[in-house]
Amino acid sequence: MLNYTIDILEEEIKEFSPQVLEILLKDKTTKKNIIWATNNYSVHGYKFGFDDQITIDSVTGFHSNVVKPRTEKTRENQIIRIREKAEVFTPSWVCNKQNNLVDHAWFGYNHVFNIEKENIWDSIKEPIKFPTESGKTWKDYVLEPRLEISCGEAPYLVSRYDTVTGQYIEISERIGLLDRKLRVLSENVDDKEEWLNWAYKAYKSIYGYDWQGDNVLLARENLLCTFIDYYVFKFYKEPSEELLLNIAFILSWNIWQMDGLKFVVPDSCKDKSNNFVQLSLFDVPVENKPCEGCAKNDPLFHSGIYCKVMDWGESKEIKFVSLLNKK
């Protein structure tokens, strides 16, 4: 099984299951792999450019230490990413406060999962109580959809570690939105098959996207290892490769790479032309037109590749941008 800490090594994922790593690198929209979408890695040479796909070879073997969580990136690299993409990660105590606001609205009372104390918190040790007057149950909570925009390493969804300090967080103290779903599930279900069925539903209910490919990979890895943590915590044994393949498949859809302002694959908008090939001096010149969506700042008219997500209820692919007109 994976012998991971805060920095999940792609080399170890490959050794355990090349298929799991292959799925974690997939982009379901393009049917290829996610791309770097940054020039931070170009110093590593060929196939590390902005538009290059992240492959198994580019994150294992000689390049096994290339992708690192934010806390292990150099200070210079952190500053560059802040300047280029305003990449600033949120400490866990802030994530906890905001996640608590979400749960206060859903449950109708405070201190559902923990009690805040300045920059720390004390987790509630008793099983979570559900509001009987509203008729809501633990199943409703597990199914409630949650989205983390510009998710980075997904600190709002899972809290294996503090993305600012790098401090590891014990499973009993975790505060992510998915952590809370898995806690509630484990408190209410003991049968392994039923637990797995609802764990899959929990994973299908959470979503996150980011521009930069390394963040997408790190977020997917964090959510995958969170599944391992809770499975071991509940059943005192490690999950099989088959189970991790199932989780990885869900994550390849629900944690995706996207320009969050345009809802397309990063940098995929191109100028349009009439595709007329100029053969002589008497031919009509090619007319280039800027992307209409970019020119008008209209998310519905971009020439780029609109990102797709899975509608798990209908078992069909949909464009994420199509959700703009829905509640």
Image (cartoon, grey):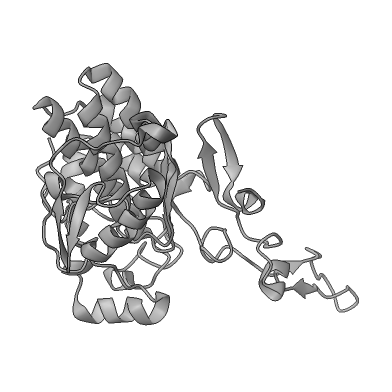
Closer to us: 151 or 20: 151
Closer to us: 201 or 222: 201
Q: Quadrant of the N terminus?
A: top left
Q: Is residue 177 visible?
A: yes
Q: Position of residue 315 (x, y in %)?
A: 54, 29
The total number of labels drawn is 0
Outermost front residue: 133
**Quadrant of the image occupied by residue 283:** bottom right
Name the residue rendered at 40%, 46% in the picture: 106
Taking the image as shown, residue 120 lies to the left or right of residue 277, namely left
Q: Position of residue 266 (x, y in %)?
A: 51, 63
**Image height check: is 292 above or below 122?**
below
Name the residue rendered at 60%, 53% in the picture: 306
Closer to us: 226 or 1: 226
Name the residue rendered at 44%, 63% in the picture: 211
Q: Position of residue 141 (x, y in %)?
A: 37, 37
**Quadrant of the image occupied by residue 292:** bottom right
**Quadrant of the image occupied by residue 242:** top left
**Image height check: is 207 above or below 58?**
above
**Image height check: is 280 above or below 245?**
below
**Image height check: is 319 above or below 129?**
below
Closer to us: 245 or 105: 105
Q: Is residue 246 visible?
A: no
Q: Position of residue 55 (x, y in %)?
A: 34, 51
